[in-house]
Amino acid sequence: MATKQRNQVRKGSHGGMALVLTEDVPHLGKQGELVEVKGGYGRNYLLPRGLATIPTEHNLRLLDRYKQRVLQAREARIADLKALAAQIGATTVTIEANANEEGQLYGSVGAAEISRALRGKNLDVQAEMVRLEGPIKQIALYEVKLNLGYEIESAVKVLVIKPPEKK
């Protein structure tokens, strides 16, 4: 009388361990793919860290539901970023910086100052999202490109001015 063991790991076509990835693993595969790995790599690394699971019917159903939730969250995030890009495109930010009489700044205006000015207007833009060719060193009006993520780009107008004279 032969009994089937629970959670017995299936062998792949090359004799390795067949697993389904629950996360993207560099140099191995994307989430949801069925991969074949060496037994030790699967038992000692992938399974304990939750990066892969044994391909049972139940686990495959759970993985499909999880992938749908992740996809919905990603689509919602993309919609939020598109709305943010539209708001940013209609915005002009003013940054005060000390300058000489010719309009040359004593310092420079960089990504951190631009993102701080945008956050001051309740637009959640991190410094890493600002794409400057180089620091701004002149008093003028600039159009600065922003990469918000998920290949969504926008541009903001940045007006660099001298602070008003104190009397």
Image: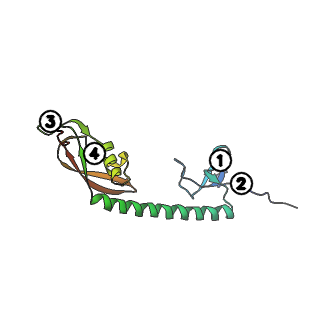
**Circle 2 is placed at which residue position?**
9
Q: Mark on residue 132?
A: 4
Q: Mark 3 or 1 closer to N-term?
A: 1
Q: Mark 3 or 4 closer to N-term?
A: 3
Looking at the rendered image, the disc whose residue lies closer to the viewer, 3 or 4, is 3
- Cα separation, mark 1 vs mark 2, equals 10 Å
Q: Secondary structure at mark 3?
A: loop
Q: Are marks 3 and 4 in contact (CB under 8 Å)?
A: no
Q: Give the residue type at disc 1.
A: Gly
Looking at the rendered image, the disc whose residue lies closer to the viewer, 1 or 4, is 4
- Cα separation, mark 2 vs mark 4, equals 52 Å
**Circle 3 is placed at which residue position?**
100
Where is residue 52 drawn, in percent x and y? Answer: 62, 52
Looking at the rendered image, the disc whose residue lies closer to the viewer, 3 or 2, is 3
Query: Would residue 72 be found to the left or right of residue 15 on screen?
Result: left
Q: Mark 3 or 2 closer to N-term?
A: 2
Q: Secondary structure at mark 1?
A: helix
Where is residue 109 drawn, in percent x and y? Answer: 26, 41
Q: In front here: 87 or 64?
A: 87
- Cα separation, mark 1 vs mark 4, equals 44 Å
Q: Give the residue type at disc 3.
A: Asn
Q: Are marks 3 and 2 in contact (CB under 8 Å)?
A: no
**Circle 1 is placed at which residue position?**
42
Q: Are marks 1 and 2 in contact (CB under 8 Å)?
A: yes
Q: In front here: 7 or 100?
A: 100
Give the answer, above or below, for where 120 lies relative to 56.
Answer: above
Q: Mark 1 or 2 closer to N-term?
A: 2
- Cα separation, mark 3 vs mark 1, equals 64 Å
